[in-house]
Amino acid sequence: IVCVTLCLLNLLRRLTSLAWLSLVALRVYAALLFALIYYGGMEIASGSSPDFMELWLPVRLQYFGMWFGTAIFAQEVIVMSQYVYDEMQLSDRRQYLPVLFGSFGISGLLFTFVGVFGYMSYADNVANVFYLNF
């Protein structure tokens, strides 16, 4: 199924065709974010989540590699941004900088929120890939 899906996606020649698929994916991620806030908030409100200071201190450097690898993977979309830039057909490259900084800034803040809130709610039960938690 995955192979067939990837082959069909290769037939898309314009980003506008892919934008509709991205909208579907964004709706799925929005539903997952809502579920995290709803159920994670219930965990925090019920008091079943661990103490905040116990979660963060002392810093456990032995898990840095797993965190860093996941964080780098989440930002691998920089390759896709080159296609977006080409499709925008701008006369000056500097016109693209607000799009680039804005999208990566918002994504970075959202990823940070999901990571911190999820860890505060579920502690070490959180999987390193977001969708594996459901």
Image: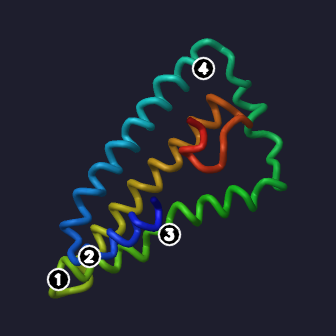
Given the image, on which type of amino acid does mark 4 rest? Answer: Glu
Residue, disc 2: 96
Q: Amino acid at mark 2?
A: Tyr
Name which of mark 3 and mark 4 comes first in the sequence.
Answer: 4
Instruction: Decide: few, some or many residues near mark 4? Use Cα within 10 Å; few <14, some 14-19, many ≥20.
Output: some
Q: Mark 4 or mark 2: which comes first in sequence?
A: 4
The label nearer to you, 1 versus 3, is 3
- Secondary element under disc 2, as helix, strand or loop, is helix
- Residue in front for this viewpoint, 107 or 95: 107
The residue at the point 60 percent across, 20 percent down is 43
**Where 9 falls versus 82 (above or below)?**
above
Relative to 111, 128 lies left or right: right
Amino acid type at circle 3 is Glu
Q: How crowded is the residue under tag 2: few (<14 C-alpha within 10 Å), some, or many (20+)?
A: some
From the image, tell me which residue sits under label 4.
43
| CB-based contact (under 8 Å), mark 2 and mark 1 | yes
Describe the element under mark 1 as helix, strand or loop. Answer: loop
- For label 3, the SS is loop
- Residue at far top of view: 46
* Residue, disc 1: 90
User: What percent of the width, then of the height, locates residue 82?
Assistant: 34, 80
Labels 3 & 2 near each other (Cβ < 8 A): no
Front position among marks 3 and 2: 3
Separation (CA) of disc 1 from disc 3: 23 Å
Residue of label 3 = 76
**For the N terminus, which image quadrant?**
bottom left
